[in-house]
Amino acid sequence: MKPAAFTYARPADWPEALALLGGGARAQAGGQSLGPMMNLRLAQPGAVADLRHLPGFAGVTVTGATCRIGAGTTHAAIEDGAVPGLLGRILAGVARRIAYRAVRNRGTIGGSFSHADPAADWVAVLPVFMGEAIAFGPAGERRIPLDGFLRGLFETALAPDELLRAIELPLLPAGTRWGHWKFCRKPGEFSKATACVLAVPGAPVRAVLAALDTPPLVIADAGALLLAAPEAEAARIVAGLGPLEPWRAALARTALQRAGLAAREDA
Amino acid sequence: MTSPQGVRAQGVGASLLRKEDARFLHGRGRYVADITLPGMLEVAFLRSPVAHARLLGMTKPEGAAERVFTFADLDGVGHIRAVSGLPGFRISEQPVLATDKLRHVGEAIAACVAPSRACAEDLVAACVLDYEELPVVSDMLSAGLPGTALVHEHWSQNAFLETTRQDDLSELDAIAAAKVTRRLRTSRQCMAPLEGRGVLVEWDPRLEQLIVTTSTQMPHVSRTGLAEILGLDEGQVRVIAPDVGGGFGYKGILLPEEVVCAHLAIRLGRPVRWIEDRLEHLTANANCREHHYIVTAWADAGGRLLGAEVDATVDAGAYSSYPFGACLEAAQIGSIFPGPYTLPKFSFRTVSACTNKPPILPYRGVARTGVCYALETTMDALARKLGISATAIRLANLVPPEAMPYRNLVGKVFDSGDYPEALRRAMASVDLAGIRARQAAGECVGFGLAVFCEQGAHGTSVYAGWGVPIVPGFEQATARFSPDGVLEIRTGVHSHGQGMETTLAQVAHEVLGVETARVRVVHGDTALTPYSTGTWGSRGAVMAGGAVAEACRLLGERALAIGAALLQAEPGAVELSGGAIRRRDGGAAVTLAEIARTWYRQPQNLARDVDKGGLEVIAGYRPDPDTGTHSYACHAVTLRVDRDTGEVAIEDYLVVEDGGTLLNPMIVDGQVLGGVAQGIGTALYEEMPFDAAGQPLAGSLADYLLPGATEVPDIRLDHMETPSPWTRFGQKGIGESGAIGPPAAIVNAINDALHRFGAEVLDLPATPARVLAALEAAR
Ligand SMILES: Cc1cc2nc3c(=O)[nH]c(=O)nc-3n(C[C@H](O)[C@H](O)[C@H](O)COP(=O)(O)OP(=O)(O)OC[C@H]3O[C@@H](n4cnc5c(N)ncnc54)[C@H](O)[C@@H]3O)c2cc1C
């Protein structure tokens, strides 16, 4: 379990990073997914571009009603409150349950989203927000709606010559309700079913169902999950997913119901 | 057992803090992977990607002829042959590198050497294999069917061994009040010690000796095996086991990789090292357990067992491993199945199936964990059918204390104990009425029990009958004073978590009164310690403990004679107490340290007729009878089942355990707690699935789930201490016990919770998927 030989570069600015990428280098953020893949030789890039020293790679800024989270912001920073307000409380709750602290200290929100593992936590949560991914390529910045970013298993809307630079999320008004539930049996195990429900006052209730070995399913009008008896709605959504093993389908239904219940009870 | 001062400060029974922890807690432990030598080469193995194939050839990377080695390159190296004397045993020849056939995924084909492991792996990646796939034998139950491909082509059938016993059970259907049949399965597991295997071999041209530093729990057995396979004198092999990060049985096996590294070290004239990585550990080597049972049991209306019939199959994998062999699990099922009960009639058939999977190796509990699972879930099924409690059916069948020592129908002899009392004590500290009330209120909670006994430290008379390469005899220990009065104990067992550097020092203190801080326990080096089969079978405390006590007793006699002379007293007028030889009349005393100083450095003061053997003694010990001690325990579990997710949450875990006299109760607690944690893994988490092509499906610890700190609840422990009448201090082997009971107790509790919904879990581990499937099937 040692990686094949590779060269390592530490670009100092974004154009240099893009140039390395153009030359065939693989981007590395926290290395928490890339590292294991390279050790198992499932990935054998000839060159690695370590993004962690790029200006603005990590960090959170708020402009007006928009929060911009640098792609290199670690799960740990988000857990520790890097994002302000209600949005920050929600994201911290998600971050806290990713793996364990040692992984969170290095793993990044952008790395996780770019990696697009269907069972990953940010993959299961970010599409619920009406936000955008900021891609950076040879032609400059490009905005991709979060619910259109994930294109398949381990597949995103990023072009091969693009990097993910930031995630932009709208700040959440008071009265927003949130429910999130994931099934994993021990910390560090990838989820077997995740659901989240976001009810922003005055907007349609949104939900995501994920971690079912398929790309996340975004439910644009999920109001029925907030009802006292969400079972029928949960069953309907899961039935629409296509064939699932019965136990997995049961978990998926439970995920939706419990996320819905949590949102309903979120004061 | 109290010291002269009347306190159990350091001797037998004291919860002394572990001497070895200073180095472990400060990160000063030294494991194989911590050791490097100048000029050392690292090895990576090219391993089989398929489960069954004819190996047609392997093309070495260009220019790497002298860095890549196949079996053809290993002159004079034999195959690993672990035979059994049991009639009908089929012998497998395990090549240390595959020859003409590949028999399981991960089987080593070639050794690639390079200055670093990464470069060695580059060589592996550049090797080109040529093979022709064969039909795969991946299912132990159909492995023996006619027409199935043969794993070993000269065999008539894919089975190492079949054993049977036939009692007349034909009457039972007519007279029994209840009869149940269950089909049960335990998963294939990996032992997963924190440290995997690893070996570093160096050839010393001066001594003409191989120095093999390896992560083993039985250095002397490794030495014998290595010497035989390499064609060397045993004197040419020195095995050193440094700190070993957990063994659990996996470190009791001679691995092909060790043989290959040893050969390469001689051939290349440079130190050679292989450190197993977790992928190799999980997918190529560390496989264990995997039983299938069809159990039928009959009972009368009071719950008394009338008889049982067991058809058991163990997936033993492709080869018989050295030294315990391929039948360690299956062949024991017949003799263990009656459990702690007075079973009157019993028939069984056991099969050690041969499949295209890695060899099955011993793991803490060995066959007992599966057997306890099969027996105890069957007991609960009977109780449910009879409408009596799980407690009642066990009390009706447990061997009563007045029957001890008790010989059961298959000839196992239980030494001592009050088995029913362990159960009663457990029930007294569980709120069963509260659990029943919660169930009545609709909560999906359950309560489960497992009662079992564990044979440990069984010796010559037991193993001689098996005809395996390892038969334990008299356990030996050396006790000697150094000139400064430090007592050195040399033992051939190895301590890798058992705390024996502490407990054996306590035994020495008990006998000689030397402060444990001045007792040095030396182990893990064939050049420094007397021969021993090592640490396995819950034998350390009984066997090494007994041997150390005997060596110290004899050393004390030598010291007493010298001391008496120095005190100008008759030997009968002095006694050994508190680390000194004292005149019985309360007069002068001379410390053991002074006696040591006299022997080594002031011999002019010794009497003319002094025993010339001096202050160094080797002594042997074996309990009589040597059929083993039986510790026993009752595990009692309360848990909740989430019917929507199939998740199990343990609310309370209680162990009532009787290990006889406890040498160090704190260390025994640690042994039991660690064992229970592993048993929880067996019960709920651990599983190495294979697909029909024989591919292992859990390649990392993300897929092979081990219970961690967040999955193991606080465990309540309660000890009984019934001494064994046969051992030096009354101690019993207890090292594996904790890992035996959990699957049975936990699944019994799950089924207690589920049976009101008509559901029952039969297969381990009881994952959410299995629990949900059981509930689904009951809908
Ligand atoms: C033991 C363990 C347990 C884990 N458990 C969980 C868990 O429970 N839940 C969970 O969600 N995750 C888990 N993870 C994964 C972890 O969250 C990773 O941090 C995450 O998947 C990847 O983030 P990273 O920053 O480490 O990315 P890297 O590993 O550095 O990169 C991952 C991939 O994304 C690409 N990439 C990275 N950054 C960018 C960018 N800015 N633009 C374009 N491409 C980029 C890389 O080229 C690579 O292909 C676990 C990891 C480990 C090691």
Image (cartoon, helix red, strand yellow):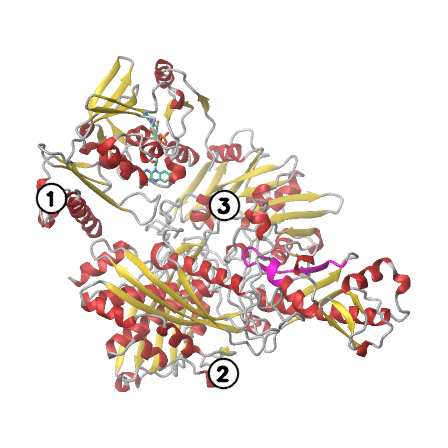
Q: Chain of mark 3?
A: B
Horizontal side of B537 relative to B616 (left or right) equals left
Residue that label 2 marks: B404
SS label for mark 1:
helix
Which residue does the numbered mark 1 point to in the structure image? A226
Q: Amino acid at mark 1?
A: Leu
Category of crowding for the residue at label 2, using alpha-carbon neighbours closer than 10 angstroms: few (below 14), some (14–19), many (at least 20): some
The answer to which of B633 and B307 lies nearer the viewer is: B633
Inspect the image, locate mark 2, and give the three-letter code of the amino acid beneath it.
Met
Which portion, as a residue range, is magenta? B485-504
Q: Which of the four quarters of the rendered structure image does ligand 1 lie in?
A: top left
Looking at the rendered structure, the kind of residue marked 3 is: Ala
Q: Residue at x 42, y 61 (%)?
A: B676
Q: Is residue B496 magenta?
A: yes
Q: CA distance from mark 2 to mark 3?
A: 50 Å
Q: Nearer the viewer, residue B324 or A58?
A: A58
| Quadrant in which residue A17 is drawn | top left
Q: Residues within 10 Å of mark 1 (few under 14, many from 20)?
A: many
2 or 3: tag closer to the N-terminus:
3
Q: Nearer the viewer, residue A227 or B218?
A: A227
What whole-number distance in Å separates the C-alpha atoms at marks 3 and 1?
A: 57 Å
Q: Is residue B270 above or below residue B712?
A: above
Which chain contains the residue that carries disc 1? A
